[in-house]
Amino acid sequence: MAEDPDTALTVALAEYEHLREARRASNDQATARFNFFLVVTSAATAVAAALITSGGGGSTNTGAVVGIGSLVLLLGLTIFVRQVEFTNRARLYAVAIDSIRTYLARRAPEVAPYIVMPTLDDRGVYQGRPPGGPWLRDAVGLSGTIGLVNSALLALGCGLALRRAIVPVWVAVTCAAVFLLVSAAAHVWYIRHRSRTAFTVIRTSVEGRHPRSDGPVRGDVPAPRPGGDESPEPVTDPPRVRWHP
């Protein structure tokens, strides 16, 4: 007589496969948008350089360059906001996959010691903080790179506007550099703000859905204290979400 099917396991595996496909599709969309932005920016840069070096009418070429730069900046801002949402969605998919993996590990506790990647009950292989901290991690990501290009366009526009106002070159360059730093910091701040907001919502939802595991929690490596102090503190209640903003 055939055994009754394990409906819970079937549903969990189907959900796991769906999450994997959804995360892959989200990552593909994010990469495609990023590549599209790079192609448009490169083409716009080539056209602007050709107009500047063509030796044609000054006011006409300047107007064309300003128009091209404005369009690229508008495109960059919209793709930047969308890219941040793609990043947070990918993190949500990662936590959802960890949730299903936690269920599977709890079903087979004898296999849990061989699961290296983190689950909601286990830190897995502790990798520590990202090099340079979360600010540097976000600054060099896809969203941060788009934000840097946007900041460079804004700084260039600021410098050119000051030069047309007949100010000294060093004043225009200094103002453009300051504008670049301020704009880049604003882009990274937005990434961090959206990341913290998403983390809070995800953590609240996960901790409300998952009861505490009755078994011992493996991998309780002492975590660094906040604020840069590397002295360890005991881990008494491991966080449910292993992604930290």
Image (cartoon, rainbow, N blue to C red):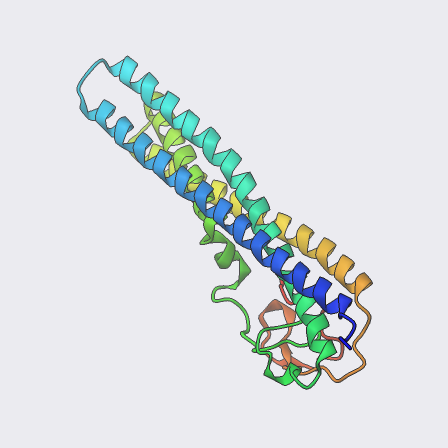
**Quadrant where the C terminus lies?**
bottom right
Task: Please report the residue visible at 72 percent of the width from the left and 62 percent of the height from the top.
Answer: 11
Closer to the camera in the image, 74 or 26: 26
Closer to the camera in the image, 156 or 205: 205
Q: Against 200, is 238 above or below? A: below
The single residue placed furthest to the left in the displayed view is 55
Q: Is residue 80 visible?
A: yes
Q: Is residue 75 left or right of residue 102?
A: left
Q: How many marks?
A: 0
Task: Please report the residue visible at 62 percent of the width from the left and 64 percent of the height from the top.
Answer: 243
Q: Say which quarter of the image contains residue 203.
A: bottom right
Closer to the camera in the image, 8 or 112: 8
Q: Is residue 188 left or right of residue 174?
A: right
Q: Against 131, is 231 above or below? A: below
Image spot of residue 141 (x, y percent):
47, 53
**Quadrant where the N terminus lies?**
bottom right
Image spot of residue 227 (x, y percent):
61, 67
Q: Is residue 149 left or right of residue 17?
A: left
Q: Say which quarter of the image contains residue 109.
A: bottom right
Q: Say which quarter of the image contains residue 20.
A: bottom right
Q: Is residue 241 visible?
A: no
Task: Please report the residue visible at 68 percent of the width from the left and 86 percent of the height from the top.
Answer: 110
The single residue placed furthest to the front in the displayed view is 1
Image spot of residue 128 (x, y percent):
55, 73
Image spot of residue 184 (x, y percent):
47, 44
